[in-house]
Image (cartoon, rainbow, N blue to C red):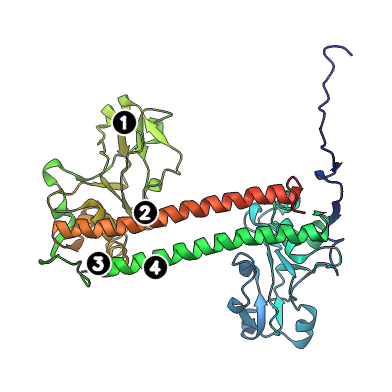
Amino acid sequence: MSSDSPRQSVIHISPGYRQTEVGVIPEDWEVETLTSVSKEPMQNGVFYEPVRKGSGVKLINVGDLYGPIPIDSDALELFDATQTECERFRVEEGDLLFTRSSVVPSGIAQCNIYWSSKPEPVVFDSHVIRLRPDTRKVLPAYLFRFCVGSLARHYLVSHAKTGTMTTIDQAVLGKCPAILPTKAEQAAIAEALSDADALIASLEELIAKKRQVKQGAMQELLTGRRRLPGFSGDWETKTLFELADRKKELFDDGDWIEAEFLTERGIRLIQTGNIGEGQFTDKESKKYISSESFTKLACKELQFGDILICRLAEPAGRACILPNIGEERIITSVDVTIFRPLNSVADRRYLVSVFNTRQWFEAVNGRCGGSTRTRISRGELGKIEITIPPLPEQTAIAAILSDMDAEITALAAKLAKARQVKQGMMQELLSGRIRLV
């Protein structure tokens, strides 16, 4: 063979595995299609008419497929289906349901499973496709896991029709490959992934409860309805203008930066998208300007610890403290107000907590204007009044709320890790790279 001949890649297949059209799988696994593992032909549901909603039997619509897993039967709306429709479009325990259309390609064929043994009739909407698994071949719980896994998702998204809406029909859905382990291994895989889901659900529930507790604490502590032990003294009402260090002109807007001034490196530009409700986020693509542009535009340089208030929706008034983000020099955009309060009067963490309350956003919204975009001017922002306790009490309240935030953040990190682990488990278990039996 000549040295310039093309090299052929060699796929190493471990003992006990074999090559198939969908990749390397265990020898005792089979490749079927969704049609071949269906007990009966797939079908679309009952035609939805708004005038028939509100009474009758429960109805599964597209939105329910994006909700809890399995579908929450208690949350379904009622629909006045006829007896014939109830018989033809009845949903049974273990049925899989898929969306027929989506605004974005990634949302096509969204799958969920109905898993309720309640003796009540449930039907499904015409924008949904029902698949009834043949339990002689496949366990519904396993097939659901496979249909939300990467192999099935890649096939369904890549074979859908894309236009104004992304759509998929029963024929395309039915041709999707389905890898089937033995029934015993299907059960083990489904149980392992169900356990992972249970952990994720418990963390989500705990985080939701912690956030509710924090919201309750904010309502009590930031309004003075509950005073911390050992603190007394009157609360004062001040405008943001009065709280700012006016001598240093530190209630001011950022700079108007045109696209032509942006560079790949230099002085960091903080954008409105970096400002969350009470938190700084660095998910936005980073933007910079050069030192020459900084001098030419007479930009205002930020300091770590500055409060940044976004004057644009959604929502206007959201604020955060600028943390140390590893940049030497930082500026911000014109739609952001730089607020550096007097340290002798206000605790910055306390103020940001106030800026994350319903009352604050209502006050901001009441002063917003603009014909095309909701925004508040710096002048109107500065006139907003807030009521604050003496500085030591502000600091104590801020510490309590900060501890709550830290706990929620730690739980959120644990949740993200659990989701990541589950994704890895799905990849390994549904491909047979890891065997459970």
Residue at figure coordinates x 18%, y 49% from the top left: 341
Q: Is residue 169 left or right of residue 259?
A: right
Label 4 to label 1: alpha-carbon separation: 37 Å
Q: Quadrant of the C terminus?
A: bottom right
Q: Which of the 4 quarters of the picture holds residue 268?
A: top left
Q: Identify which residue, 206 or 82, lies in the foreground.
A: 206
**Mark before the other along the chain sequence, 4 or 3:** 4
Q: Nearer the viewer, mark 1 or mark 2?
A: 2
Residue at figure coordinates x 61%, y 60% from the top left: 197
Label 3 to label 2: alpha-carbon separation: 18 Å
Residue 294: percent from the left, percent from the top? 29, 29
Contact, mark 1 vs mark 2 (Cβ under 8 Å): no
**Mark before the other along the chain sequence, 1 or 2:** 1
Q: Secondary structure at mark 1?
A: loop
Q: Quadrant of the N terminus?
A: top right
Q: Is residue 370 left or right of residue 162?
A: left
